[in-house]
Image (cartoon, rainbow, N blue to C red):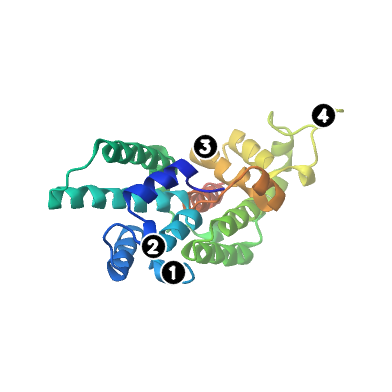
Amino acid sequence: MPNLDNFTKAKIEHLFAMGGGYVLDFSNASFAEFVKTAVGFDPYERYPEAGSKARTLRAIWDGEPVGVVATLLLQMLEYWRTSNLTHGTVVSENDQRIYDELHETLSAMKEKTEPSSAARRFLALDFSSLDLRRLPAAVDTQEIINQRIIEISRCLAAEAPLAVIFLVGSTLEGILSQVAQGKERQFLSASRAPRDKKTYHVLPLSRWTLSNLIDVAGELHILSLDVQNFADHVRKYRNYIHPERQKREAFTPRMQTARIAQQVLQAAMQDISNLK
């Protein structure tokens, strides 16, 4: 799904004077340096086939996450405004109106990609002291869990958010499933235990979903409220393991979602390690 609609692209093309392959008054070197400073990568290394500055910028706004695109274009808008002020350029009413409309559109895009204050607080929690050896005896897969934690960190470093979400989801489900087996009576008797729609009998643990496990673990005070509140970043997006569903719902994974998912897993393991 494109980051920008055709009208927004047309406004940017006009304001940044992108005809003939140019972008504002950037040279190739200054353009590369501006992009690296704004969003942290060399545009020519990432999009070597694009060619001109204009084509490279188009490749960026079509290929990068929404937050990256909005951040870069907002900084370019500010460059355009500052350059006009510095050179004493008189900006036409039409161009000022286009600037204002673009600034509003791009600011809204960026705001949607930034974590809420609650998410920032959750992400700030420190789980560096997490000790897998403190997990209850029912969770007897600590070595595998540790391998997955390492792999999740590598996927984050490689900016592979979908891989992080899938790894977190499967790992969290496996841990909670083992916890549920160790506390089978409590889980099966919980008010939020899933039931068969026809018989209304509680489903066996083997048929519980990640969502069921999180809900009941929350009811039993095994998982903290923070984990329950942010668990949707795991259980909802994990369903996009099916490509056709991801295509149908036009889901684009973001690094913010992946980081929250990682934090959910770490917080859940911390909660579970405190079980008596």
Residue 21: image tag: 2
Can you give x and y, in whole percent of width and height, for residue 46 in the image? 45, 68
Mark 1 crowdedness (10 Å alpha carbons): few <14, some 14-19, many ≥20? few
**CA gap, disc 4 and disc 1:** 59 Å
What separation in Å lies between label 3 and label 1 (alpha carbons)? Answer: 45 Å
Name which residue lies at 71% across and 43% down: 209
List the single residue furthest toward the right.
199
For residue 91, say whether it is visible.
yes
What amino acid is at disc 3?
Asn
Disc 1 and disc 2 in contact, CB within 8 angstroms: yes
Classify mark 4: helix, strand or loop. Answer: loop
Q: Nearer the viewer, mark 4 or mark 1?
A: 1
Judging depth in this view, the residue of 179 and 226 nearest the camera is 226
Front in this rendered view, residue 29 or 155: 29
Q: Secondary structure at mark 3?
A: helix
Disc 3 target residue: 229
- Badge 4 is on which residue? 197
Q: Which labelled disc corresponds to residue 51? A: 1
Mark 3 and mark 4: Cα distance apart in space: 26 Å
Mark closest to the chain's N terminus, 1 or 2: 2
Q: Amino acid at mark 2?
A: Gly
- Whichever of labels 4 and 1 marks the residue nearer the N terminus, that label is 1
The earlier-in-sequence mark between 3 and 4 is 4
Q: CA distance from mark 1 to mark 2?
A: 9 Å
The crowding category of the residue bearing disc 3, from other C-alpha atoms within 10 Å (few below 14, some 14 to 19, many at least 20), is: few
Give the left or right position of residue 232, taking residue 24 as reference: right
